[in-house]
Amino acid sequence: MATGEAALFARLGIRREEDLALHLPIRYENETRVTPIAAAGSGRTVQVEGVVVHSEIVARGRRALLVELRDDSGTITLRFFHFYGSQLRQFAAGRRVRAYGEVRGGLFGPEMAHPRYRLVSEGEALPQSLTPVYPTVSGLGQGRLRAAILRVLDTLEWPETVAPEALRALGLPATLEALRAIHRPAPDVPAEALQERTTPAWRRVIFDELLAQQLSLARARAVRAGQRAPALPEDALARRLVETLPFALTGAQQRVWREIGGELAAAQPMNRLLQGDVGSGKTVIAALAAAQAIGSGWQAALMAPTEILAEQHLRKLEPWLARVGARIAWLSGSLRESDKRAVRARVAAGEVDLLIGTHALIEDTVAFARLGLVIVDEQHRFGVAQRLALRARHEGAAMLPHQLMMSATPIPRTLAMSYYADLDVSVIDELPPGRKPVTTKLISAGRREQVIARVRAAAAAGRQAYWVCPLIEESETLDLQTAIETHAALQAELAPYRIGLVHGRLPAPDKQAVMSAFCEGRLQVLVATTVIEVGVDVPAATLMIVEHAERFGLAQLHQLRGRVGRGAGESTCVLMYRPPLSAAARERLKTMYESADGFEIARRDLAQRGPGEFLGARQSGEALLRFADLERDGDLLEAARRLAARMLREQPDRVQAHLQRWLGGREEFLRA
């Protein structure tokens, strides 16, 4: 393979012959039959065959090469906007052409724009299988990809990594047989089953991918069990913190704290995910974990994805932990360099017990004297590489810190079984007493004046409201209200009530000042972008208005709704939408109206969008599961989990071969 071509293949993640065989089609095209031109209706993607009647380059409007093709039933025009001069000679009158593409109605009859075509002789045999279409990059055509893949399939030795008896029990074919059936499907295989990836061949490939994931995560768990972490036994500090809290722990919080406190006391690194719906009280568990580490003579760090969320943690944790004598510091990118240096010096000297901040905590310049516990909030909001960086700071050290990850986005069961299989999971499945359900209303943007009247009535009654907008500056293409414009309009419409504005580009001191004013009741309405999506806790805020709700994802809408209902008053979330709604947007809003259960919302969100948002996958730049669908392939996931456990016990050589084939050194991204 030439250097230039190798670079193109590398951009697709293809570096080995095995990678070529595992570069699977995204769809198939049916070139096994020819459709008569007269039967090729507009909007259909078909293959036609005919004789060139006429071809010419026209310059009317956009320059194009036009080829008129005729068969016994009629004529069709092939239109090319990008072409070489030699193509005109190719399409000489009388040449026979097969063309594959979408038929559209043109001014002078049916057309195909930029069809795939080839010159053929009369009676030339048709392909005997569907034509695969692969993911590719500019400069690497489908023909070159197909040729390289088929060459590998014909020559590559592919020893089995799964025992024959396991395959028989699942009714799955051998790997090489499956790959050949996917790359060169037989003509009698239903196209729909191929496209839906439900054929036995596709199920084998999907099973192998899930098995690689399960083996990697199970091995990571086993490796961690052999590593050392500081034992952080429960001491008086955590007990004293419970006694000084202004509320009693719920039953669910007590159960979760027993799980986490017990694990911190062990000398193996804890790697636990704490799940709980919005408002369930995860922060107090984080405070107790930090107190147990501090009471044992170690430091703790809490990292949050945004400054607003990190500041909320500081605002909540500082008064609780200060009562028991803990020393807390704050570190974020917006601090002056001199202040950052001072904080880093105190942390390195062991003069800070708990460091709270944003991703600034993982910068190379931050060194802890005795880091015993890392807490990562809203862990899915960090890129995989960022989460790895925090842990990698201590890889190779004599002891690893314990790690507690928290998420208010409940993880659906199938997702927890796959991507979080190396973690222990604790769930707070009970809201604190007194929390009332939030009423959700769907209102068209045409009734905006009624919504403003409702906000005015809330302010007059001494309550507060959020007004959330998706953008902070004008966008002609999306035609969305901006937070800045909305703030100005509401100031006029709601006078004399005070309206605040907060968004991601506001300088940190200004942002903090606005949030403080809202938290203290000096502002009646807070206009904001989604920077207030998580972590903001204002009991007097009983009304949430989400403008252009159809533009938000389910997880965001659920988080935003969770900002209200935190006090004793009745709370309402108004999802204001602009019709007409797409089918997906209608489904999202219907879900929010029907359910307040974070796990059910997360399940529907996973079904609609896939796992990327839950996992922070977009920031990692690495594919996660390329072929499996966790909803469709749940039975294979269960089987892969069981077989992974058996292989790790009994077949270590097969484990290594399977991981090398499927992951090729990329295991760390599954374990983030």
Image: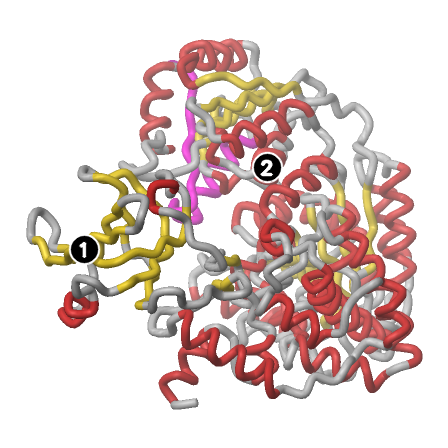
Percent position (x, y) of residue 383? Answer: 56, 61
Question: Whole-Å distance between the Cαs marked 2 and 1?
Answer: 55 Å
Percent position (x, y) of residue 395? Answer: 70, 80
Residue depicted at x 45% and y 34%: 528
For the question of whether residue 295 can be seen, the reply is no
Q: Which residues are magenta?
A: 495-519
User: Pointer 1: what residue?
Assistant: 53
Decide if residue 83 is on the left or right side of residue 421: left
Which of disc 1 and disc 2 is earlier in sequence? 1
Residue depicted at x 15% and y 69%: 89
Quadrant for residue 214, please give it. bottom right
Disc 1 marks which amino acid?
Val
Residue depicted at x 52% and y 30%: 583
Is residue 505 on the magenta stretch?
yes
Decide if residue 305 is on the left or right side of residue 354: left
As helix, strand or loop, the secondary structure at mark 1 comes to strand
For the question of whether residue 593 can be seen, the reply is yes
Quadrant including the N terminus: bottom left
User: Pointer 2: what residue?
Assistant: 554
Nearest to the observer: residue 575 or residue 378: 575
- What coloring was used for the rendering? secondary structure
Percent position (x, y) of residue 514? Answer: 46, 36
In this rendering, the label closer to the viewer, 2 or 1: 1
Disc 2 marks which amino acid?
Leu
Percent position (x, y) of residue 296? Answer: 84, 66
As helix, strand or loop, the secondary structure at mark 2 comes to helix
